[in-house]
Image (cartoon, rainbow, N blue to C red):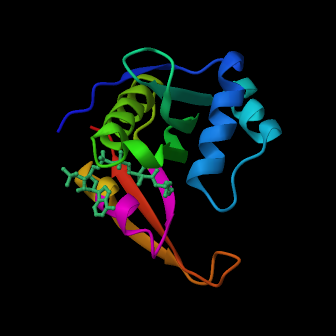
């Protein structure tokens, strides 16, 4: 299913909505300061996904582009809106944005136990290039994945 969703660059006015989304999506959500920092950093490309009413915050992503390499720092979809294609819309959008900004590849780290994210990434052309053992505080491994941009 393709999601009915509006994706646009996030602004400082979106911080409160994104902080609430973080709280719903992660055990270790980013703080208001961290989210605001993403929006302020000049090398970041932050996108927000909104419902058709333009109000409900359904997802977001933040990507850093430095020279020829982009890093996907965050992607999350509201728990009530998952499996509707929004994650894929956000990843496709950031791939376009990274390429436009001059990146030749996109890197990310994902918990080895995060099947949903890994399947999403594999379906958008990422492949595992490395495993960082005991990378997370709980002792879990991280997979490093790469998407080459053509
Ligand atoms: C990972 C996440 C962003 C996916 O968002 P989403 O909007 O549900 O993803 P989509 O609906 O676009 O799914 C695209 C594909 O990914 C795969 N996928 C998504 N969720 C899945 C799940 N729970 N189990 C298996 N595959 C899954 C499927 O192949 C899916 O396509 P399909 O629904 O046609 O089968 C979402 O689960 C999320 O926010 N998780 C919590 C935050 C997080 O872990 N972020 C990533 C940190 S690295």
Of all residues, the one furthest to the right in this rendering is 33
Quadrant of the rendering where the C terminus is positioned: top left
Q: How many marks?
A: 0
Of all residues, the one furthest to the left in this rendering is 1
Task: Please tell me which residue is depicted at 82% across the width and 37% down the height of the picture.
Answer: 33
Task: Please tell me which residue is depicted at 70% across the width and 27% down the height of the picture.
Answer: 15
Task: Please tell me which residue is depicted at 28% across the width and 58% down the height of the picture.
Answer: 122
Task: Please tell me which residue is depicted at 35% across the width and 50% down the height of the picture.
Answer: 147
Q: Is residue 109 above or below residue 147?
A: below
The image shows residue 36 at horizontal and vertical percentages of 76, 30
- The residue lying toward the viewer, choosing from 124 and 1, is 1
Displayed quadrant of residue 118:
bottom left
In the image, is 32 to the left or to the right of 49? right
Magenta stretch, residue numbers: 107-119
The image shows residue 7 at horizontal and vertical percentages of 42, 22
Quadrant of the rendering where the N terminus is positioned: top left
In the image, is 88 to the left or to the right of 105? left
The image shows residue 4 at horizontal and vertical percentages of 28, 25
Displayed quadrant of residue 66:
top right
In the image, is 65 to the left or to the right of 147? right
Q: Is residue 6 above or below residue 49?
A: above
Task: Give yes or no for residue 118 being in the magenta stretch.
Answer: yes
Q: Is residue 116 above or below residue 78?
A: below
Q: Which of the four quarters of the rendered structure image does ligand 1 lie in?
A: bottom left
Q: Is residue 50 above or below residue 64?
A: above
The image shows residue 57 at horizontal and vertical percentages of 52, 29
Task: Give yes or no for residue 106 being in the magenta stretch.
Answer: no
């Amino acid at each position: 299913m393709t999601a009915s969703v509006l994706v646009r660059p996030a602004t400082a006015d979106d911080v409160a909505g994104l902080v609430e989304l973080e709280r719903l999506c992660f055990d270790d959500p980013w703080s208001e300061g961290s989210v605001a920092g993403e929006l302020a950093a000049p090398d970041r490309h932050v996108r927000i996904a909104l419902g058709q009413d333009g109000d409900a915050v359904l997802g977001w992503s933040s990507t850093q582009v430095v020279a020829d390499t982009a890093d996907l720092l965050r992607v999350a979809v509201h728990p009530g809106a998952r499996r509707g294609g929004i994650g894929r819309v956000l990843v496709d959008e950031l791939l376009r944005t990274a390429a436009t900004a001059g990146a030749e590849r996109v890197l990310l780290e994902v918990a080895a136990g995060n099947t949903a994210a890994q399947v999403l990434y594999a379906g958008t052309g990422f492949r595992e290039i490395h495993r960082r053992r005991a990378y997370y505080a709980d002792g879990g491994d991280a997979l490093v994945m790469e998407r080459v941009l053509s």
